[in-house]
Image: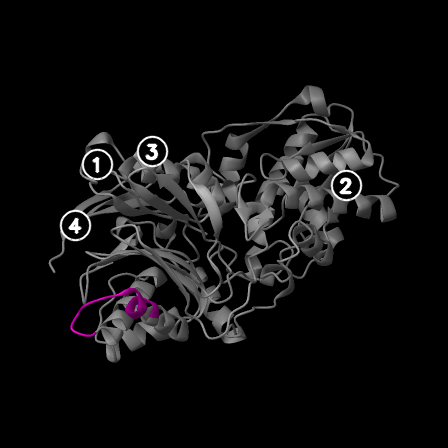
C-alpha cells in the first residue's frame, strides 16, 4: 500500500507534487520521493521519512520542470527501510525512465532471474518495483524501432508487462523526452484515478492513487484507470489511452474501503465514506438480529477510519455516539508501522481514553478491522483503566485469517490474531467481554451497493481466495520464511536522503 502521483502541467509541478503527496501520506510513512522532468533531464530527491521531513526548500528548488511523479512508500514483509529502497526508481536504457509503483508482484523472483539471464538487465535492490521498472524498460526496447517512441509503441510495451507480471500494480512512470505513462494491473486490485485542470494555457493532467489528491489540487476527476488500461500524456499535454490486456476484470481490494483509503476518496466509483456508513448499518443489523441481549450504553469509534461505521451503527441502534479517545495527530497509523514493538508502543502514544466518558458504562468500541490484535488489545485495556463496566468490541470487517500478497503487510498467518482462533478465542485474546465481526457477504454488499458497477472484490485476507491464480502454498511458505529470517534491522528507520540530478541524452 503505497501512494503514487503523476502530473503533466503548464507550469512548474514541484509544489503540486509535494502537496499531493501530503494528501497521500496515509498510504505510506516509510519513505518519500519526487522526480521532475525538464526536457531530457530528470531531477530527483528522495529519502526515508515523512514528506515534510524529506523535502526542504533547498530540495524543492532543484525539482524543476512541468512534469513529474511522486511516491510515498509503505514497507511490506521483509523489506528494508533504506534510501536505496525509496521510490521512484530510475534506469537509463534504452531510455531514461523513472517509475513509482503501488502493489506487489507475486512473481518478482522469477522475473528477477529472467531479467538477469535472458534480458541482460541488472537489479540493484530487493524491491519488486525495480523489477517492474526493468521489465517495462526491456519491453520498450523490444517494441521500439530506431529508438523512437510513439503512443502505440508504448502501449505495446505495457501489453508485454501485463503478459509477464503477476500480482497487483498501479504505476506512474516518466520517459525522458516523451511524457508520462500510467497503467493498472488487469485485475484492478490497487486504485488509480486521473483528472484534468482545464488551464487557459492548456489542459493539465493528474494521476493519483486516490481522488482526494485531485480535489485538493484543483483537478476535476475524470474516472478511474481501468484494469489493464494504459494512459500516456506527452510533454505537450496530448492524452492517449488504450486497453493493453487481453483479459481483464475489475476486482478492487476491499481493504481499501475498510481501512486504507481516505474517507473523502472515491475509488472505482464507490465513495469510501458511504461504504463505511453501510458497514456500520450492516453491523447494527447483525446486533439487532442476534445480539440484542447486549446492554450497550454508548458507542465509541477507534479514530479515525472507523468513525463513519460507528456513527451509523449508533444511529441505527438508537444508542449515544461519543468520542471516547483523543488522538495525537503526530503519531502515524499503527497498522502500517514496521515492527510489532513499535506498533504496540505507538498505540499508547497515539490514543488516550477520556475517563469521564467510560466510567461505569457498558461501551461498544468500533474499529475498522482486527489484524494482529495489538491495537485492539491495548485499546480494550485503556477502556478498562478508564472505568468501563463492560467492553464490547465490533469490527467493521470480517476476521483477517490469511496473508495478503498484493501490497498490504499481512504476510504470515502466525502474525494474524484470527488464525486458527474462533471469535470467542479472539475476544479472550484482546480482553473484551464480547466481540462482533462483520460477515464477508455483508461487507461486499456494503461496498457494492454504493455503485452497482463494482460487483467483485479482492478479498483474499478474509477468505484465502487469491484472484491472480498463481499464489500457491509454496509461495506463502516462502514469504513466511523470508519474514521469519529477516534481520531486525528491517524495522529501523533511516534518515539518510538522496539528492540526484539525472541527465539523459537523446
Q: Which residue was labeled with disc 3?
A: 52
Residue 297 horizontal side relative to residue 472, left or right: right
Q: Which residue was labeled with disc 4?
A: 39
Q: Nearer the viewer, mark 3 or mark 2?
A: 3
Q: Nearer the viewer, mark 3 or mark 4?
A: 4
Q: Nearer the viewer, mark 1 or mark 2?
A: 1
Quadrant position of the C terminus in the picture: bottom left
Can residue 466 be seen in the rendering of this structure? yes
Quarter of the rendering containing residue 61:
top left
- Mark 1 to mark 4: distance in Å? 19 Å
Query: Which mark is first along the chain, 2 or 3?
Result: 3
User: Residue 72 in the image: x percent, y percent?
Assistant: 37, 46
Disc 4 crowd rating (10 Å Cα; few below 14, some 14-19, many 20+) is some
Query: Which mark is first along the chain, 3 or 1?
Result: 3
The structure residue drawn at horizontal position 51% and vertical position 28%, both measured from the top left corner, is 328
Q: Which residue was labeled with disc 2?
A: 433
Q: Which residue was labeled with disc 1?
A: 59
Residue 150 horizontal side relative to residue 302, left or right: left
> Is label 3 in a helix, a strand or a loop?
helix
Q: Which residues are magenta?
A: 145-155
Amino acid at each position: 500500500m503505497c501512494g503514487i502521483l503523476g502530473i503533466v502541467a503548464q507550469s512548474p509541478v514541484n509544489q503540486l507534487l509535494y502537496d499531493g503527496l501530503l494528501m497521500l501520506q496515509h498510504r505510506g510513512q516509510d519513505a518519500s520521493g519526487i522526480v521532475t522532468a525538464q526536457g531530457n533531464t530528470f531531477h530527483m530527491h528522495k529519502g526515508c521519512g515523512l514528506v515534510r521531513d524529506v523535502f526542504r526548500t533547498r530540495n524543492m528548488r532543484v525539482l524543476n520542470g512541468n512534469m513529474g511523479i511522486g511516491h510515498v512508500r509503505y514497507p511490506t514483509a521483509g523489506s528494508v527501510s533504506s534510501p536505496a529502497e525509496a521510490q521512484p526508481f530510475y534506469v537509463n536504457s534504452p531510455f531514461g525512465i523513472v517509475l513509482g509503483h503501488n502493489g506487489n508482484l507475486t512473481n518478482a523472483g522469477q522475473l528477477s532471474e529472467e531479467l538477469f539471464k535472458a534480458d541482460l538487465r541488472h537489479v540493484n535492490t530487493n524491491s519488486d518495483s525495480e523489477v517492474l521498472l526493468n521489465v517495462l524498460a526491456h519491453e520498450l526496447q523490444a517494441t521500439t524501432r530506431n529508438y523512437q517512441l510513439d503512443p502505440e509503441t508504448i502501449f505495446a510495451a505495457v501489453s508485454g508487462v501485463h503478459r509477464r507480471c503477476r500480482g497487483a500494480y498501479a504505476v506512474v512512470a516518466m520517459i525522458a523526452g516523451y511524457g508520462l505513462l500510467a497503467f493498472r494491473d488487469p485485475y484492478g486490485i490497487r486504485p488509480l484515478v486521473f483528472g484534468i485542470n482545464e488551464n487557459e494555457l492548456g489542459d493539465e493532467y493528474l494521476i493519483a492513487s486516490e481522488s482526494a489528491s485531485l480535489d485538493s489540487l484543483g483537478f476535476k476527476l475524470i474516472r478511474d484507470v481501468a484494469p489493464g488500461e494504459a494512459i500516456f500524456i506527452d510533454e505537450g499535454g496530448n492524452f492517449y489511452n488504450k486497453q493493453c490486456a487481453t483479459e481483464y476484470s475489475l476486482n478492487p481490494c476491499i481493504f481499501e474501503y475498510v481501512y486504507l483509503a481516505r474517507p473523502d476518496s472515491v475509488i472505482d466509483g464507490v465513495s469510501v465514506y458511504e461504504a463505511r456508513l453501510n458497514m456500520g448499518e450492516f453491523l447494527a443489523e447483525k446486533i439487532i438480529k442476534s445480539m440484542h441481549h447486549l446492554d450497550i450504553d454508548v458507542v465509541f469509534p477507534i479514530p479515525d477510519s472507523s468513525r463513519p461505521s460507528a456513527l451509523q451503527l449508533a444511529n441505527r441502534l438508537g444508542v449515544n455516539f461519543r468520542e471516547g479517545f483523543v488522538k495525537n495527530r503526530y503519531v502515524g497509523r499503527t497498522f502500517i508501522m514496521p515492527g510489532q514493538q513499535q506498533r504496540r508502543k505507538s498505540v499508547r502514544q497515539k490514543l488516550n481514553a477520556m475517563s469521564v466518558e467510560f466510567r461505569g458504562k457498558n461501551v461498544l468500541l468500533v474499529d475498522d478491522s482486527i489484524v494482529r490484535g495489538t491495537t485492539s488489545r491495548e485499546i480494550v485495556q485503556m477502556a478498562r483503566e478508564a472505568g468501563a463496566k463492560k467492553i464490547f468490541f465490533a469490527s467493521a470487517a470480517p476476521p483477517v485469517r490469511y496473508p495478503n500478497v498484493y501490497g498490504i503487510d499481512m504476510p504470515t498467518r502466525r502474525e494474524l490474531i484470527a488464525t486458527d482462533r474462533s471469535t470467542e478465542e479472539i475476544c479472550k485474546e484482546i480482553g473484551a467481554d464480547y466481540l462482533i465481526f462483520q460477515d464477508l457477504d455483508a461487507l461486499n454488499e456494503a461496498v457494492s451497493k454504493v455503485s452497482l458497477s463494482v460487483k467483485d472484490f479482492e478479498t483474499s485476507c478474509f477468505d484465502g481466495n487469491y484472484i491472480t491464480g498463481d499464489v500457491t502454498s509454496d509461495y506463502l511458505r516462502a514469504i513466511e520464511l523470508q519474514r521469519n529470517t529477516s534481520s531486525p534491522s528491517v524495522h529501523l528507520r533511516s534518515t539518510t536522503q538522496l539528492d540526484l540530478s539525472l541527465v539523459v541524452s537523446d
